[in-house]
């Protein structure tokens, strides 16, 4: 089964001269051969030496190393991406562990916050509310005739950084870089999109550099209409594209997903991707601890759409393990800033309502406020799993963690908020406050922690383990929709590949360097479920595996042949 044949096929193009050098999907820079330089009018436009991609990578890496600040490294890598995409992905592939935190979480957060300040060149589509009645024209302007994955944001809740307006484009770009680097989706088929409906971020509105619409976000009705116009326009232009919704604010995230998920190949990464990776990581933790998920009591801090999405996925998994649904629900506790969500709490959002604890359940609890606090929940429920999706730094205090440890010999603690500085507690703190008896995973990357002669590898429970594989699987099988069962298959595949659960050593999840191999396994599992559910045409296992390989792009230069343009 080989794909090198694919990348060795010649590529026919009408671009030549400086236009060819300025087309990042085609540019090879100093790697254009003598024949190509002659055929494409490049002679004299490049230094005379012909270089291999390896030589180019080593020059780039040397330049990369000369930058100290992560944001400057980010700017540098983005410039390579905008100049020569093949080289960018080759460089990233060779230094994946070092560069993922630069092109993705956490540095991508800084890049979103400073988007207008560090802006260099155009990438993707900026769709302004003002253009809402010309969307067909706008989408035509994206010269890509085939788009397989769109990551779209409106920038209203970027990571844990709130409303970043047009800066949200940074996250769409970052996610798609991972689709290619880890999921093998060719950059020719990806498109980052920013829907600019204004911003409520006062600082940005006053910033003379700000490049987005300088107005507050449009009202709800206008907003809904705009989203609908966008989805319909995408369906006309690229009917096969997967639409990944990214970093929409809570009040819009779930309704948008519900409106489109039964008719469009779409998913919400923050709700479903985060849920799938968390369930997968939690299953891995449960297996390495030797206690199944349905025997755990789980506390969430943060009851927004992400937290509630994960909670529902955990409940489904507990039910799949044989627990009655009501019992599963009684083992999951949602805490937000007012305390534990109970059936007497007013003004709950619709997605929170099925996740409350009943008054009867907590009748025997003692607490002093209107609702039990996080600390009360620790004392009274004695949870075994604690998950932070609050976006609030420091919420897991020493008192909280020590209280949890009192009721559970080996707690599972996931402070998941992104980027790193929003984390509920650092892994170092969690390990110290539990005296090292803990299974910990975070949303952003953290260095290994050394505690009393032991080394703790800190697993990054991040959507990046999930979405590239889902995308690849949906594309390989040509699945019509993305179902909960497909997402569950992704979680189970992730857990099945846990080094710690399988061997007793190593990380809870595989290292990022294995993401490409893992994404293919996830793609296979996701595609199989799509077929079983009638969401994709049946293929036998070999044919499916071959499709996955065929769709897996590699950063290698192809030979070019000129055609008239
Ligand atoms: O981007 C990440 O690292 C994970 C994510 O989707 C978020 O935090 O919104
Ligand atoms: Mg996100």
Image (cartoon, rainbow, N blue to C red):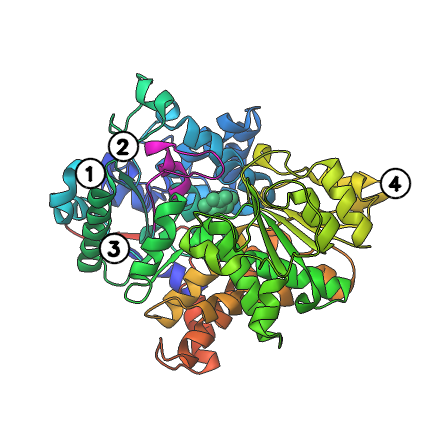
Mark 3, residue position: 12
**Is 549 included in the stretch rendered in magenta?**
no
Circle 1 packing at 10 Å, graded few (<14), some (14-19), many (20+), is many
Closer to the camera: disc 4 or disc 1? 1
What's the magenta region?
151-172
Badge 1 element: helix
Mark 4, residue position: 452
Mark 2, residue position: 198
Circle 4 packing at 10 Å, graded few (<14), some (14-19), many (20+), is few
Badge 3 element: strand
Instruction: Kindly give the residue lying farthest to the right in the view shown.
Output: 453
Frontmost residue, 202 versus 338: 338
Task: Please indicate whether residue 132 sits to the left or right of residue 524 in the image.
Answer: left
Marks 1/2: CA distance?
8 Å
* Residue at (39% x, 63% y) in the render: 6
Mark 1, residue position: 129
Q: Disc 4 or 3, which lies upstream in sequence?
A: 3
Q: Disc 2 or 4, which lies upstream in sequence?
A: 2
Give the percent coordinates (x, y) of residue 88: 44, 41
* Proximity of marks 3 and 1: CB atoms separated by less than 8 Å: no
Frontmost residue, 501 versus 83: 501
């Amino acid at each position: 089964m080989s794909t090198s044949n694919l990348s060795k096929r010649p590529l026919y193009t009408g671009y030549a001269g400086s236009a060819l050098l300025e087309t990042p999907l085609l540019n090879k820079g100093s790697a254009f051969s003598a024949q190509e330089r002659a055929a494409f009018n490049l002679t004299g436009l490049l230094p005379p030496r012909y270089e291999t991609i390896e030589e180019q990578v080593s020059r780039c890496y040397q330049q990369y190393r000369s930058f100290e600040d992560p944001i400057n490294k980010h700017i540098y890598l983005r410039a390579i991406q905008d100049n020569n995409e093949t080289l960018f992905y080759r460089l990233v592939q060779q230094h994946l562990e070092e560069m993922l935190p630069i092109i993705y979480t956490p540095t991508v957060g800084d890049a979103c916050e400073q988007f207008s300040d560090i802006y260099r060149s155009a990438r993707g589509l900026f769709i302004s509310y003002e253009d809402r009645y010309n969307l067909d024209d706008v989408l035509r302007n994206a010269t890509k005739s085939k788009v397989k994955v769109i990551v779209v944001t409106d920038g209203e809740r970027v990571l844990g950084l709130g409303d970043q307006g047009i800066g949200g484009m940074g996250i769409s770009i970052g996610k798609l870089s991972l689709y290619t680097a880890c999921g093998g989706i060719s950059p020719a088929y990806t498109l980052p999109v920013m829907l600019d409906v204004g911003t409520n971020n006062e600082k940005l509105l006053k910033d003379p550099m700000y490049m987005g619409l300088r107005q507050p976000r449009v009202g709800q009705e206008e907003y809904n209409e705009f989203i609908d116009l966008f989805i319909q326009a995408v369906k006309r232009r690229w009917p096969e594209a997967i639409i990944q919704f990214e970093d929409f604010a809570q009040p819009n995230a779930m309704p948008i997903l519900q409106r489109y998920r039964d008719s469009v190949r779409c998913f919400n990464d923050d709700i479903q991707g985060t849920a799938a990776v968390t369930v997968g990581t939690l299953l891995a933790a449960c297996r390495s601890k030797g206690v199944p998920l349905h025997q755990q009591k789980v506390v969430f801090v943060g009851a927004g759409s992400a937290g509630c999405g994960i909670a529902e996925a955990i409940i489904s998994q507990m039910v799949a393990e044989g627990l009655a649904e009501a019992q599963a629900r009684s083992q999951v506790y949602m805490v937000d800033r007012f305390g534990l969500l109970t059936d007497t709490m007013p003004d709950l959002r619709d997605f929170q309502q099925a996740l409350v604890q009943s008054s009867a359940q907590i009748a025997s609890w003692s607490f002093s406020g209107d609702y039990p606090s996080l600390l009360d929940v620790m004392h009274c429920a004695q949870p075994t799993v604690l998950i932070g999706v609050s976006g609030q730094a420091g919420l897991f205090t020493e008192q909280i963690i020590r209280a949890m440890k009192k009721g559970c010999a080996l707690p599972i603690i996931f402070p998941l908020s992104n980027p790193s500085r929003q984390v509920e507690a650092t892994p170092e703190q969690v390990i110290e406050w539990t005296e090292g008896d803990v299974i910990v995973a975070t949303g952003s990357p953290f260095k290994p922690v050394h505690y009393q002669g032991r080394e703790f590898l800190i697993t990054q429970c991040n959507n990046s383990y999930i979405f590239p594989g889902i995308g690849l699987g949906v594309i390989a099988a040509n699945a019509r929709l993305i179902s909960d069962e497909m997402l569950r298959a992704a979680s189970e595949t992730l857990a099945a590949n846990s080094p710690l659960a399988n061997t007793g050593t190593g990380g809870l999840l595989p290292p990022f360097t294995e993401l490409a191999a893992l994404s293919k396994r996830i793609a296979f599992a996701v595609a199989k479920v799509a077929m079983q559910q009638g969401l994709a045409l049946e293929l036998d296992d070999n044919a499916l595996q071959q499709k996955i390989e065929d769709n897996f792009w590699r950063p290698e230069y192809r030979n070019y042949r000129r055609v008239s343009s």
